Amino acid sequence: MRQFFPALAVAATLVACELNAQATMPECRLRVTSKTTYTGRCVWHDTTVALLVLRPPSHPPTGRWEGINIRIFGHGGDTSDVVDWTAFSPAMVDVGATGDGVYGGTLGWLAVRQATIDSSGLGFSVDLGTAVPPTTADLQILRAVRAYFSDSTRWNHVDRRRSAIVNCPGAPAPRTLFCAFYIASQEVAGEFFGWRPAGAALQAAIAAASPRRYQHPLTDFNNDSVINFATIQAVVDDAIHRVGSKLGTR
């Protein structure tokens, strides 16, 4: 039996990857690849912008689909894709009863539109123009990062990450900016999604603090030889202010 949410505009055949050239939102199509895995891509104007591997919730279609987002370069065809396996990160799609919800991945922390599921798989659109606002958890995460960086002995100026694999010791030790954010996220929210509003605020604060544009903002900014501990503290303070302002909290 095919299940649809009200007022859906997603095509019934979810395996298809073609997009209308005038589409304004990336369209994601994931097909069933095993009993516990759905795999597919998000395509925008005939260009693949994300590859997702997700596990369904206990009672789909509503609920949180979780897995990984892999960076991919391609044009909608399997044979022409170039997959960067060093650049993957946690991803999720939280689908509500109306077909709307939240996408968290490399495209951002954005609204999901027009979600549908049938025997072939899952389909939804990502609204690039609608960022999901922060919650108090985002503010708590950033405050935990700032509390950790109470003095310079707690900052590790050398982040040796060269892939998306996380190796952040939980025991108190000098931490990089990324590891401080990662551990604070785990402690506050019980999970880590680098693209949640707290992470977006950190990246915006980094962009405001440095004229350089980093490929991996938290890691590369942390390692930049011109950055000192006071700047790290100031960036976290700025991120706290950005999120607090949106929440109406000083």
Image (cartoon, helix red, strand yellow):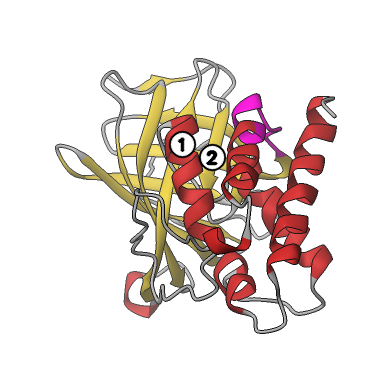
Q: Which residue is mark 1?
A: 93
Q: Amino acid at mark 1?
A: Val
> In front: 213, or 30?
213
Residue at the spot 52% in from the left edge and 43% down from the top edge = 104
Left or right position of 129 against 160: right
- Rendered location of residue 250, percent (x, y): 85, 29
Q: Please tell me how crowded label 1 is: few (under 14), some (14-19), or many (20+) other residues with Cα within 10 Å.
A: many
Residue at the spot 71% in from the left edge and 75% down from the top edge = 227
Q: Are marks 1 and 2 in contact (CB under 8 Å)?
A: yes
Residue at the spot 53% in from the left edge and 23% down from the top edge = 99
Left or right position of 180 against 243: left
> In front: 105, or 21?
105
Q: Please tell me how crowded label 2 is: few (under 14), some (14-19), or many (20+) other residues with Cα within 10 Å.
A: many
The answer, for residue 249, to whether it is visible in the render is yes
Q: Which residues are magenta?
A: 131-139
Residue 16 in the image: above or below residue 101: below
The answer, for residue 18, to whether it is visible in the render is no
Picture quadrant where residue 118 is located? top left
Q: Is residue 163 magenta?
A: no
Picture quadrant where residue 234 is located? bottom right
Q: Is residue 138 magenta?
A: yes
Q: Residue furthest bottom?
A: 225
Q: Amino acid at mark 2?
A: Tyr
